[in-house]
Image (cartoon, grey):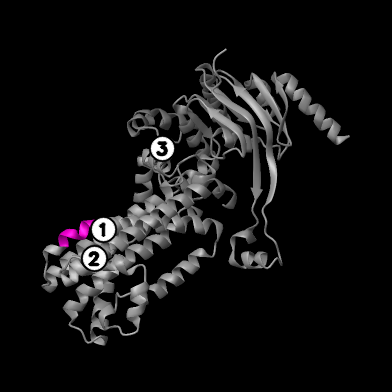
Amino acid sequence: MSAPLLSLRDVGLRYQLVQDDARTMKGRVLSALSIRPTKPVEFWALNGVSLDLRKGEVVGIIGPNGAGKSTLLKLMARILEPTVGTVAVNGEVRPILDILSTMNGTLTGRQNAFLYAAIHRIPRERMAEALPKIEDFTGLGPFFDVPVKTYSSGMATRLSFALATQFEPDIVLIDEVLAVGDESFARKSYFRMRKLIESGSLVVLVTHSLGQVEQLCNRAILLSGGKVRADGMPRDVIAAYQDSLRVGAA
Amino acid sequence: MIVSDFREALAYRDFLGYLVRQQFHQRYHGSALGLLWAVLYPLLTFVSLAFVFSYVNNWDVRDYGVYFFSGYIVWNFIANTTQGAADAITGQASFVTSVRVPKLVLPLAFAIAGAIDFLLNCAILAVLMALLGARFSLALLVTPVSVLIICVFVLGLSLIAAVAQVFFRDFKFLLSSAFFLGFFLSPILWKAETAGPLAIVAAVNPVVPFLRLVQWPVWKGVVPDPSVFGIATAVALATLIGGAALFSHTQRRFYYYL
């Protein structure tokens, strides 16, 4: 078996919910006088998570809201550091998490492609070379040279998906974006995903669409309360998830 | 840890370049005169303040103008850059919460943009000196060293301001009040030698050595005392090391405060 591309060992993340008051002078003064304490509320968003993810795996992460799915993805993207345990990343990670928020609305799609390259340390020349393909894939036509702030959310998503999947990175992290876009783009992105998978990338996908997990993934992980509850074949894990929902409803 | 933070930041050169360009773009984009404002605005303050205060101080306007402007550009570099950098993290939260880039790049870009502005102002000062017939002494040869020391100081202050604003949202207002007061408590509009009781303020004001590093070679035509260089270098290095240590130590917690 090949060495894992992503390896999490006993990972725990203590999340801090900081109250707005804790950041203001009024809040600090009241807190210091013990009139209204502003100690951050802390909870373990993830606890005792150990996972080995390998080349060629397409992993669907499922679970109820607040299970820690997005937090897990942010750990894999190294945006968050674990409070305990280790996250070892063995390759180039390309998260498709929240590309839109780091885009600059006043820049055009083309300029944002170079901003994306700068953020992800893709050499300018490599981006310049890939640009025609990206432009073509987005299907944005003349809008590719128009400021991104004028884009519809679907158009912006197409641009970010095209950017994140163009360079066939070792590890692709996706948080609920495949559902966006019209019928024809959804098909295009599905084929792009298949190609990524065939090229041997590790794909980690957080989604609420169990159908998508069954269709795309060859491994599923059920997360609940910050812990891994099931890990295995998508069909089995989905069944376990549905069982847990039924128990909860009863 | 501090050194590796800086090394990582420099590996993101393209991103750093984007952020620096963005500073100038945001400031002047859409205005009819664009970047020309970077020259016009300091000129306007120079002309108005030099005339008013040379009259108030009963001081020859040409001599006073050179004195005032040489301190004023140093002050502006320190004050404007630090106040701008207070927004480096809070104003660009998505670069902390959505992608993994070295966070140090964010305040670093403010310091670099501020330094570019400062160098531009130095060029304006040189032109004004030529126009006013001021003396260009050999002491000016030390000014590159002066500029370097001031840059180190400003970078340190920028790091501290960026961190402080994350954890303490009133910081910006405190900072601008402090700088407003500090401007009048520093020998920029007035001269320490003739300031009477204000001279005591000048003696303990930590910004004064940085002002002297430029004021003396430019206006007096003399190389500042080694003690001025020594104090300025010590304050600058302490600020940078302190700021970088603070930044390294707290950056993992930024995410939760944004």
Chain on which label 1 sits: B
Residue B234, label in figure: none
Q: In 3D space, how far apart are the residues under numbered discs 2 and 3 (Cα atoms)? A: 43 Å
Are there few (<14), some (14-19), or many (20+) residues within 10 Å of tag 2?
A: many
Q: Quadrant of the N terminus of chain A?
A: top right
In the rendering, at what x and y percent does residue B218 appear?
18, 68
Q: Residue at left 35%, top 67%?
A: B207
Are there few (<14), some (14-19), or many (20+) residues within 10 Å of tag 3?
A: many
Q: Compare residues B218 and A111 and report the one nearer the observer.
A: B218
In the rendering, at what x and y percent does residue B47 appear?
24, 76
Are there few (<14), some (14-19), or many (20+) residues within 10 Å of tag 1?
A: some
Q: Secondary structure at mark 2?
A: helix
Q: Secondary structure at mark 1?
A: helix
Chain on which label 2 sits: B
Q: Label 1 amino acid?
A: Val
Magenta residues (range): B140-146
Q: In 3D space, how far apart are the residues under numbered discs 2 and 1 (Cα atoms)? A: 8 Å
Indicate the quadrant where residue B2 lies: top left
Q: Label 3 amino acid?
A: Ala
Q: Label 2 amino acid?
A: Val
In the rendering, at what x and y percent does residue B183 appear?
36, 73
Q: Can residue B87 be seen at all in this image of the molecule?
A: no
Q: Are marks 2 and 3 in contact (CB under 8 Å)?
A: no
Q: Can you identify the residue that label 1 sits on?
A: B147
Q: Can you identify the residue that label 2 sits on?
A: B214
Looking at the image, which residue sits at the far right? A250
Residue A113, label in figure: 3
